[in-house]
Each structure stands twice: as structure tokens, then as C-alpha cells.
Image (cartoon, grey):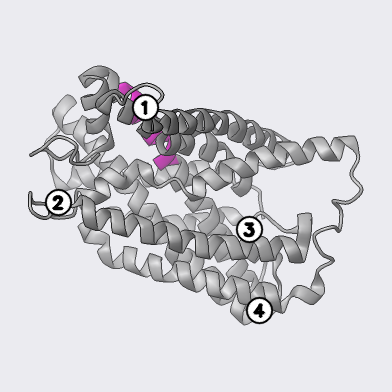
Amino acid sequence: MHEIVPGKRFDRYHELGQHAFGPKLGLWIVVPQQLIVEVGTNIVYMITGGQSLKKFHDLVCDDCKDIKLTYFIMIFASVHFGLSQLPSFNSISGVSLAAAIMSLSIFCSTVTLQLHGVHQSKGACNQMCNMGINQRLQGYFNFFSGLGSIVFAYGGHNIVMEVQATMPSTTEKPSKKPMWRGVVVAYIVVAICYFPVALIGYWMFGNEVEENILITLQKPKWLIAMANMFVVVHLIGGYQLYAIPVFDMIETVLVKKLDFSPTWYLRLISRTIYVAFTMFLAITFPFFNAVLGFFGGFGSAPTTYFLPCIIWLAIYKPRRFSLSWFANWVCIIFGVLLMIAGPIGGLRQIILQAKTYKIYGST
């Protein structure tokens, strides 16, 4: 739908929403949901980046003094204080390429580590075969949180307009054709990277697997340490991809609404404050899986599953009960259910973990 109107490109998600629902309503429908996803993703990446750095440190330096997770999140954030000053998606193309390569490296390393450690596991039935009522109830809530995590993993739609806006487009060669091929390849790669890791991990460790599989694995140390650094590089690129649209929104409001001059120090101050804000929230709530499930359901489900379908129905107005109408409504209902289930499971995990968590004291 990037070029749904001939001769016009919708370079921002909210511009498409404004076309479908009107200038004011479209803005209020799209922007809050998009911000929830982007800010939530940046918080999750901060947490995960800090965890991976800590794991790397613990593996390569057995005798070193234990350092709190808080400090590793701060180290990860320090990189983004510099990278956040890059102006656009085109400026971080090298970082994005490195992040994409790291995704495949993480997949290869993790599968190798899982197969290497198969003798350490007790299988998927280790604690699942004989569960009491409370355990089953906990399993249901974890299932809800897991749904949110899956939505998070496949929820890149909220920045797809901004990404396509960087591609040249003409009447003869519209950008939708290479964009469609890129999206198909991207989702195939995501599926190849995620499904084997998930299936082999569950086969090996069952419900004893940690929320971050690389935290569960222990040997060989050198390969686990290398895989965690792959994760760090991948997350550095991913953080910037989701942060740049937020930077654009912040600076647009500051310049057009509050009459600030578009100077270099406005960018420096506004972007530094945003990075510090996400770092602060990551340090305050370092619950990777719970935060992932919550934001996956509450943010990614609307922008990925049912908001695009609602916009499609509003613009194209397909005939009622036609295949297109029916398919879009199935996605809308499915997306709403995910939006309800994911936050329930994620919020419950956050509450349970917060009971025993000493703020700013996590190790």
C-alpha cells in the first residue's frame, strides 16, 4: 500500500493511516501503536544486548568479579549515543548489513551449540509429563506470553513504509516489486533461523530452557562467547532500525509544532535523551521474556496483523463476503486475540519477576 495512490508515496505508516481514516483520526490510530512497538523493541534490545555482553564477560573471564547486568546495559547503550546521531536509514546501511549477517551467524552457532549439548539434556518431557493444576495454569500463561513473543519476532510491519521510502520508484519500475521480493526473502530467512532453534532447543531442554537459549548453553565456551557477540552486533543494527522512525517523529514535533530550529544540537539532545530513556527502562525492568511477550502482543499484533487489514478494507472496500473481505477479517480477529493474550501472559510474568527483583541490583 506504499504506492496505493498513483503518483504519491506514503513514506510513513501514519501517512497511510491518515489517508484511510482522515488527517486527525489516522494520526491518533497509527502513531501511538507504532511508538509502542518501536520504543518497546528498543527496550527489549537494550535488555538483550546487556544480557549477551554479561554472558560474554562471564565466559571469557571466569575469575573476574561479578558485574551487575545494569552496567552491561549501560555499555550497550553507550554505542547508541554515537550511532543515534546518524541522520537516516541510508546512513546505517553498513550497520544493517552487519546485523543481517550476524542473524545467520547466530542461527548457525546456536544450532551447533544445541546439537553439541544434547547429551546434557533430559528431553522435552523432563517436567512436562506430570503437571499439577497450578503448573498447568502457569503453562497456559506462559503460552500466552509465548504468542506475544512470536508476534514480536514477525512484527516488522511498523517500519516497512519507512524502509520502502528509501528505495527509488518510478511508474515503469515501482518500488513495490523489489520490496515484495525483499519481504518474502526476509521472512523465509527469519523462519529458517527461528524454527530449527526453537524445535531443537525444546527437544533438548524441554521447559528447562532459559528465555535466551544462549544463556542456557554452557559449552563450548568459545563458541557461546562468539555467538553472544554476534547477538550484540545484530542488536546494535536492530536498535537503530527501530529508533530512527522515533527520532523522525520527535524532531518533526519539535520543529513543526514547538518551533525549534533544525540544528545539529537539537538532534544531539533529543536523540541522546531518547537513548537514555530506553536505557533507563531496560535497567528498571530487565525481564527479557516478559517484556517481549507484553510488547509483542500489545504493540506488534495491531500494527502487524489487524491494522493493515483494517486500512486495506477502508481503502479498497472489497465486496462483502468475498475472498479478500473474508481473509482480512480472519486476520483482524486473529490479531485482536493475539493482542489480548500476549499482554496477559507478559504482564503476569513481569509481576511475578518483580516480586523477587531488587531494582538496579540484578546480576
Q: CA distance from mark 2 to mark 3?
A: 40 Å
Determine if the magenta segment contains residue 31: yes
Q: Which residue is mark 1?
A: 310
Q: Earlier in the sequence, mark 2 or mark 4?
A: 2
Residue at x 63%, y 58% (from the top left corner) = 212
Image position of 301 (left or right of 286): left
The answer to whether residue 192 is visible is yes
Three-letter code, disc 1 = Ile
Dividing the picture into quadrants, the one containing residue 214 is bottom right
Estimate how packed mark 1 is, as few (under 14), some (14 to 19) or many (20 or more) residues with alpha carbons within 10 Å: some
CB under 8 Å between callouts 2 and 3? no
Q: CA distance from mark 2 to mark 4?
A: 48 Å
Residue at x 21%, y 58% (from the top left corner) = 90
Residue 311: x, y in percent? 32, 28
Residue 31 or residue 54, whichever sits in front: 31
Q: Which residue is mark 4?
A: 221
- As drawn, 71 above or below 11: below
**Which segment is the magenta one?**
28-39
Dot 4: element:
helix
Three-letter code, disc 3 = Asn
Q: In front: mark 2 or mark 4?
A: 2
Dot 3: element:
loop
